[in-house]
Structures are given as C-alpha cells and as structure tokens.
Image (cartoon, helix red, strand yellow):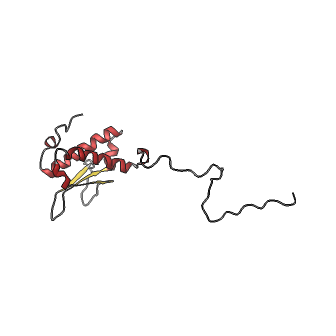
Amino acid sequence: MDNPVPPRATGPGPRRRDRHGRGMRGPIAPPQVPLAASRAEAFADLVQDSVERLERRWPQLADIDFLVLEVPRLDGQSWNDEAVPLGGSVPAREGRPARVVVYRRPVEIRTKGRDERAALVHEVVVEQVAEVLGLTPETVDPRYGED
C-alpha cells in the first residue's frame, strides 16, 4: 500500500447522496395530497367549506370577509372567568366590509377529530354570520344546533 487513495474533497456544491449512499430524501407526499397540507391550511379549508355552504342560501355573504386567526387578541378584554371565544365579528363601516373571524387554536382544542372540528367550525361561522346579518342562527342555517 505504497500509494493510498486520497480522500475526495467535498466541494461547496449540493450533496448528491446522504451519508449512507441512498440518495437525498424527498417529500413524503406530493403537494396536492391532503397529507401535505398543514393544520392551518386544513382549518382554513373547513371555514371555506362552511362559507360556501351558507353562500348558496345567502348570496350577500360574498360581501363579508372571512378570516382565520390563531388565537383571539386580548385588546383590553379579559376572559379570566369566561370561556375563550371561538369566533368574532366586526360590522361593516367606513367603506370596509363586515368581517367574520374564526379562532383556530380554541376550536382545535375543543374538538377531537376532523368531523367534530368541521361541525364546530360551521356552528361558529353560522353564529357570527347571524350576528353580522342581525338574524338568529336558526334563520341563517335551519340545521343549526342539530347533532
């Protein structure tokens, strides 16, 4: 062994294989598969599905902005003894459309599965739309309150 093979120099370029020689790992699932969607995206889809369900009956909902926020802001309010709100609404004013907000984390904490979460999201959206329109939730969605 008079002429040992010198180690190959690793350059600044991208690695072609991992340390075990199997190749670089790719994504677990393609982007169009639901597995690749984050929890926030899946939750936003639930809100959108609920809004689309209501828009068939109430076309004026197209003028309302629907938002998803992680948690409600404190803004001088305290909920020490009260439950954390699941949603909120802001009436239209000064050229701004009305807004309906659904808070993702409080809803997720109160539900166990996707079906239960979808039902609670729909209830929150119905309640907030009813508040914006000045109607009862049962008027907005006749199936409100049913299991």
Q: Position of residue 94 (x, y in %)?
A: 15, 65
Q: Residue furthest right?
A: 2
Looking at the image, is 23 positioned above or below residue 75?
A: above
Whether 110 is drawn above or below 74: the answer is above
Residue at 13% across, 51% down: 133
Residue lying at 42% horizontally and 45% vertically, measured from the top left: 33
Which of the 4 image quadrants contains residue 123?
Answer: top left
Which residue is at the far top? 147
Is 134 situated above or below 8? above
Quadrant location of the N terminus in the rendered image: bottom right
Q: In which quarter of the image is the C terminus?
A: top left
Nearer to us in this view, 22 or 85: 22
Spot occupied by residue 50 in the image (x, y as percentages of width and height): 25, 45
23 relative to 131 in the view: left or right: right
Q: Which residue is drawn at 43% across and 48% down?
A: 36
Residue 137, horizontal then vertical, whole percent: 16, 43
Residue 42 pos. (x, y %): 36, 47
Farthest residue, direction left: 134
Looking at the rendering, which quadrant does residue 119 occupy? top left
